[in-house]
Image: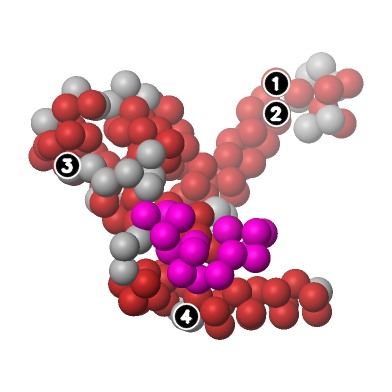
């Protein structure tokens, strides 16, 4: 595209095609879903975007679907449906994923032990935390953190 900047003839035509190709590769690539999720989130900022933002800011706080729907000025069924379209999961699953990712971050960056990390992200049961962590990341918290640290040292 930079080489087209100095060529007035084909530049407008070719730059539009190249831009479309770049967008295609961005959307169809490994992380395209994140790009699309953000685009949809921005489009829905007064409804679902508001709900997603609230969950991100308050992930350790318990909530109910009716509370979140009221906060987002949506019906419960509309919230559930649109939330799943944008995030591929329901609001409570989204919250759970945020909690587990934050716990993982705490264990990696703050050297927090498993129980402390679970409590920090508002899990009341360490065994439930372990089950859900393993379901999301494929390994128990201790093994996962050891693997990540081992792999980061060898790379």
* Residue 14 visible in the snapshot: yes
C-alpha span from label 3 to label 4:
29 Å
Which element is circle 3 on?
helix
Left or right for 96, reference 145: left
First along the sequence among labels 2 and 4: 2
Give the colour scheme of this rendering.
secondary structure
Dot 2: few (<14), some (14–19), or many (≥20) neighbours within 10 Å? some
Q: Disc 3 or 1, which lies upstream in sequence?
A: 1
Which of the 4 image quarters holds residue 5? top right
Question: Mark 3 or 2, which is nearer the eye?
Answer: 3
Q: Residues within 10 Å of mark 3 (few under 14, many from 20)?
A: some
Q: Which residue is mark 4?
A: 140
Q: Nearer the viewer, mark 4 or mark 1?
A: 4
Most common secondary structure along the magenta stretch:
helix
Q: Of helix, strand and loop, which one carries label 4? A: loop
Is residue 119 within the magenta segment? yes
Question: Cβ–Cβ below 8 Å for labels 2 and 1?
Answer: yes
Numbered circle sitting on residue 15: 2
- Position of the N terminus, as image quadrant, is top right
Which contiguous range is marked in magenta? 106-122
Q: Are marks 3 and 2 in contact (CB under 8 Å)?
A: no
Disc 2 element:
helix
- Looking at the rendering, in which quadrant would you find the C terminus? bottom right
């Amino acid at each position: 595209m930079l080489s087209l900047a100095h060529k007035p003839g084909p530049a407008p035509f070719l730059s539009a095609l190249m831009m479309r190709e770049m967008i295609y590769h961005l959307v169809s690539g490994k992380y395209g879903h994140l790009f699309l999720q953000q685009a949809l989130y921005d489009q829905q900022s007064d409804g679902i975007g508001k709900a997603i933002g609230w969950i991100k800011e308050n992930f350790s706080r318990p909530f109910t679907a009716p509370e979140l729907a009221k906060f987002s000025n949506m019906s419960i069924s509309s919230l559930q449906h649109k939330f799943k379209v944008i995030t591929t999961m329901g609001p409570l699953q989204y919250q759970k994923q945020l909690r587990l990712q934050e716990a993982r971050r705490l264990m990696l960056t703050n050297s927090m032990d498993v129980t402390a990390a679970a409590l920090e992200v508002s899990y009341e049961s360490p065994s439930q935390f372990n089950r859900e962590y393993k379901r999301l990341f494929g390994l128990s918290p201790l093994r996962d953190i050891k693997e990540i640290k081992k792999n980061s040292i060898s790379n």
